[in-house]
Amino acid sequence: MNIRIGTRGSKLALWQAEYVKNKLEKAGHSAEIKIIETKGDKILDVAISKIGSKGVFTEEIEAQLAEGNIDIAVHSAKDMQSELPTGFELIAFTEREKVNDVLVSHKDSIDFYNKENPIVIGTSSTRRIATLKHFYPHVKTVDIRGNLQTRIRKMEEGLCDAILLAYAGVHRMNYDEKIKLELSTKEFIPAVGQGSVAIEVHKTIDQEKKDILRFALNHKQTEYCLRAERAYLKYLQGGCSIPVFGLAQLEGNSIEMEAGIISLNGKERISLKLTDEASRAEELGNLIAKQVLKKGGDKILKEIREQLSE
Ligand SMILES: NCc1[nH]cc(CCC(=O)O)c1CC(=O)O
């Protein structure tokens, strides 16, 4: 069977599409990649949270799916909204890469813990900024945008000493030698979905194709974890600009999940850990969400929404 893969044209997106193409070929299928430019690729220097509309990186790709010009769309799982537009679904999640955030720098010595002479970290993730403020309030941050290659260039030009990124993207773009520190997932709990690649289809796809795709691409253990995390995100209706985090991990047949929320200034952080059977992944995500809201997460979430809309 020939599978037409739709993707954005950024280097990381192309890596992901090639990765999926390879897996399909190993399973005995042929595959081709179609690059689709999205609104998010055209508007480069505006904060995504300020462009406002959801799906700035997905709309044009979903249009191609709906028209049947491509069979699947490949995305970073963590960039996918918790609720897709009607008619679309995620049918597979590839095996998750190491989930940690890492500190990347061109400099030899980066002293993350130095309070006298604090380093400046480039990041535009509200989750990472708030987490830094909470655990390492001495560290300074500066807004940095663009793809990984652009960010590294801006850092080298002097904007900051280091940048805080997901290990998965840094590794996939071959910047391992610039990794200076690996942050613990006890403090820097990743964004929901971090490290996995998600496969999106339109509901008009026939069942046989869907089965073939799942068989070739889906990593069952990763899927359980991602379903739990995405249920959590959906319950909170948290978009990518809200500092919520969630990490589910499989131990045998059960999932241990830690998830929470942090206020933008880092002062309040609510985090809970619960365990349930893997088959109850979504219930687990929902339950943690309910408890996080009850423990004060509702108030934090409301504050964040007000602050972000200012
Ligand atoms: N929000 C941007 C983004 N989307 C996916 C990745 C790469 C890692 C992944 O796929 O989880 C990154 C970069 C980053 O957060 O450092």
Image: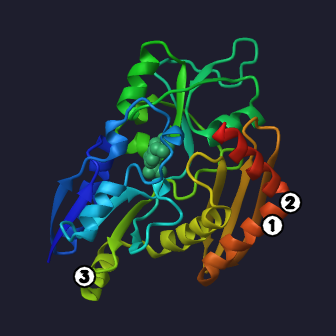
Circle 2 crowding by C-alpha within 10 Å: few under 14, some 14–19, many from 20 = some
Q: Could you say which disc has been placed on residue 70 in the image? A: none
Instruction: Rate crowding at label 3 as few (under 14), some (14 to 19) or many (20 or more) other CA atoms within 10 Å.
Output: some
Examine the image and state in which quarter residue 157 appears. Answer: top left
- Cβ–Cβ under 8 Å for marks 2 and 1: yes
Q: Residue at x 43, y 54 (%)?
A: 55
Looking at marks 2 and 3 on the same chain, the residue that comes earlier in the sequence is marked by 3
Dot 1, crowdedness within 10 Å: few (<14), some or many (≥20)?
some
Which quarter of the figure has residue 298? bottom right
Quadrant containing the N terminus in the rendered view: bottom left
Looking at the picture, tell me which residue is in the foreground, 103 or 11: 11
Q: Is residue 126 visible?
A: yes
Q: Where in the figure is residue 73, as x and y percent of width and height?
A: 30, 63
Q: CA distance from mark 3 to mark 1?
A: 39 Å
Ligand 1 has an atom within 8 Å of the beta carbon of the residue at disc 3: no
**Position of 148 compared to 179: left or right?**
left
Mark seen at residue 295:
2
Q: In the image, what residue type sits under mark 2?
A: Lys
In the drawing, does residue 259 fall left or right of residue 50? right
Which residue is pictured at 56% across the width and 42% down the height? 101
Mark number, residue 209 = 3
Question: Disc 2 on helix, strand or loop?
Answer: helix
Disc nearer the start of the sequence (3/1): 3
**Which amino acid does the dot numbered 1 rest on?**
Gln
Position of residue 299 measured from the top left corner of the image (x, y, whole percent): 82, 52
Local secondary structure at mark 3:
helix
| Near-viewer residue (182 or 205) | 205
Cβ atoms at labels 2 and 3 below 8 Å apart: no
Residue denoted by label 1? 291
